[in-house]
């Protein structure tokens, strides 16, 4: 195993994993030599409709990576997964994904500096269709 997926929406909703649980698991994973972390962040449809995308992602990253050193960030991948676009057939538009990825990098820059924020891999983990993939991949931060 090279990576552990933490913070996935199903773990958050079904198993009631909170930000403290996720942060503790991030730290446990980083204690294991060679093990990477994929930290999932993303908003529900209600949060998106309320204009909370940036604040939800900001909070999840700040709490999920609390206490993590900049030196360990080369072992971290952030996966933006809009909860409303997982298995629902709904797809984030390229512009929506771009806004989310910018929000992720802004939070990372505030925490660790812009150079580190640009170096961290940020992935889009929502639904993708053959019709949407080209436009999503054309976005500069996706």
Image (cartoon, grey):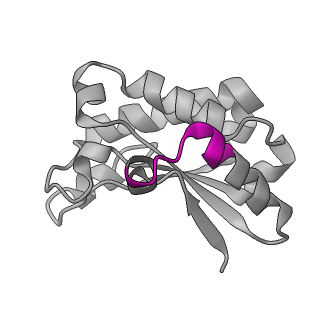
Q: Is residue 101 visible?
A: yes
- On the image, the x and y values in percent for residue 68 come to 79, 42
Residue drawn 24% across the image and 29% down it: 46
Dominant secondary structure, magenta: helix
Please identify the quarter of the rendering in which residue 61 is found.
top right
Quick check: 49 above or below 132? Answer: above
Quick check: 20 above or below 4? Answer: above
| Left or right: where 96 falls relative to 106 | left
- On the image, the x and y values in percent for residue 129 come to 18, 63
Quick check: 45 above or below 91? Answer: above
| Left or right: where 63 falls relative to 69 | left
Please identify the quarter of the rendering in which residue 130 is found.
bottom left
Residue placed furthest toward the front? 15
Residue 53 in magenta stretch: no
Query: Magenta stretch?
Result: 14-23
- On the image, the x and y values in percent for residue 7 come to 52, 51
Residue 17 in magenta stretch: yes
Residue drawn 27% across the image and 55% down it: 86
Residue drawn 61% across the image and 66% down it: 4
Q: Is residue 113 visible?
A: no
Residue drawn 85% across the image and 70% down it: 33
- On the image, the x and y values in percent for residue 132 come to 19, 56
**Which of 41 and 116 lies nearest the eye of the viewer?**
41
């Amino acid at each position: 195993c090279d990576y552990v997926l933490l913070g996935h929406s199903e773990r958050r909703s079904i198993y009631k994993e909170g930000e403290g649980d996720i942060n503790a698991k991030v730290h446990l994973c980083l204690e294991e030599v060679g093990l990477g972390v994929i930290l999932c962040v993303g908003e529900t449809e209600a949060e998106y409709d309320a204009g909370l995308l940036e604040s939800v992602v900001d909070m999840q990253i700040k709490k999920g990576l609390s206490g993590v050193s900049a030196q360990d960030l080369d072992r971290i991948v952030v996966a933006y997964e809009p909860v409303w676009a997982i298995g629902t057939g709904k797809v984030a538009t390229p512009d929506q994904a771009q806004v989310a990825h910018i929000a992720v990098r802004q939070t990372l820059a505030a925490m660790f500096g812009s150079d580190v924020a640009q170096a961290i891999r940020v992935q889009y983990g929502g639904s993708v269709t053959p019709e949407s993939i080209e436009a999503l991949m054309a976005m500069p931060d996706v």
